[in-house]
Image (spheres, helix red, strand yellow):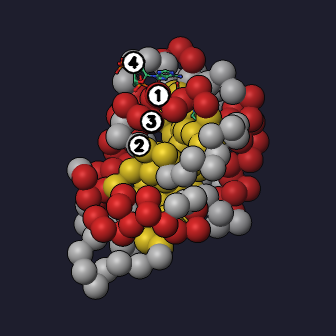
Amino acid sequence: MEIKRLTDNHTPKPFDCGDTDLNDFWLNDASNYQKQLLANTYFVEDNDRTILFFSLLHDKVSILDTVSKNWWRKNIRDTLPEGKRFSSYPAVKIGRLGTDISVQGKGLGSYIIDFIKDLYLSDKNLAGCRYITLDAYKQSIKFYQKNGFQFLTSADENEDTRLMYFDLANV
Ligand SMILES: CC(C)(COP(=O)(O)OP(=O)(O)OC[C@H]1O[C@@H](n2cnc3c(N)ncnc32)[C@H](O)[C@@H]1OP(=O)(O)O)[C@@H](O)C(=O)NCCC(=O)NCCS
């Protein structure tokens, strides 16, 4: 499976992951985000369709994202050694991720999550990055939990999306 980076002259092939906003991002807006240096998008396609796409941008995990300082100490700060206990840590955000309806449930989403974990642990990664973050749609929370992601805060329990994180030191 070849994962390609979006280029200026690429015309996206048809795609439907079941979510209108995500479809629209891939089909109409991903290249604008890339041109403005706001998010880079990667994709897999076959002859007829886009199979999947995902976008990545820099982020941070911050004490300001959590509701409880105790939670932060226990789950984030104290997992780092003495002298490395800060109020925020570098992260990469999965801005968007979608697989085409025709291939959902076949392991491709999890494959991409593993690919991103490997990417940020490999020597191809130019900058320090401890966490992967994302804003999970309610319906995809189980998928991300299966892939090792946890909630960063309870403050967004009633929101449409929930902030989740994965600690790359756990790989
Ligand atoms: C969420 C999404 C990216 C997952 O991709 P996928 O290729 O279907 O995922 P996988 O096949 O790797 O699924 C891995 C596991 O998660 C489960 N899973 C996937 N989507 C799920 C969902 N919506 N609800 C519950 N479980 C889900 C699968 O059943 C599978 O479980 P198993 O290993 O026990 O069989 C894809 O379903 C999608 O594009 N959905 C619509 C858009 C979306 O919600 N994107 C996320 C935005 S935050």
Residue 156 circle label: none
Q: Nearer the viewer, mark 3 or mark 4?
A: 3
Tell me where residue 3 appears, x and y as whole percent.
42, 42
Categorize mark 1 by other alpha carbons within 10 Å: few (<14), some (14-19), many (20+). few
Q: Residue at x 73, y 56 (%)?
A: 32
Which SS class for mark 2? loop
Q: Label 2 to label 4, Cα distance in Å?
A: 19 Å
Is the residue marked 4 within 8 Å of ligand 1, measured from its CB? yes
Categorize mark 4 by other alpha carbons within 10 Å: few (<14), some (14-19), many (20+). few
Is the residue marked 3 within 8 Å of ligand 1, measured from its CB? yes
Kind of residue indicated by mark 4? Lys
Q: Residue at x 49, y 66 (%)?
A: 69
Which SS class for mark 3? helix
Q: Which residue is mark 2?
A: 149
Q: Which residue is mark 3?
A: 144
Q: Is residue 26 visible?
A: no
Is residue 10 shown above or below 91? above
Kind of residue indicated by mark 1? Lys
Kind of residue indicated by mark 3? Tyr
Marks 4/1 in contact by CB < 8 Å: the verdict is: no
Is the residue marked 1 within 8 Å of ligand 1, measured from its CB? yes
Kind of residue indicated by mark 2? Phe
Tell me where residue 132 appears, x and y as whole percent.
43, 54
Marks 3/4 in contact by CB < 8 Å: the verdict is: no
Residue 142 circle label: 1
Q: Residue at x 44, y 63 (%)?
A: 70
Q: Label 3 to label 4, Cα distance in Å?
A: 15 Å
Which SS class for mark 4? loop
Q: Label 4 to label 1, Cα distance in Å?
A: 15 Å
Which SS class for mark 1? helix
Q: Where is the N terminus found, in terms of image quarters?
A: top left
Q: Label 3 to label 1, Cα distance in Å?
A: 5 Å
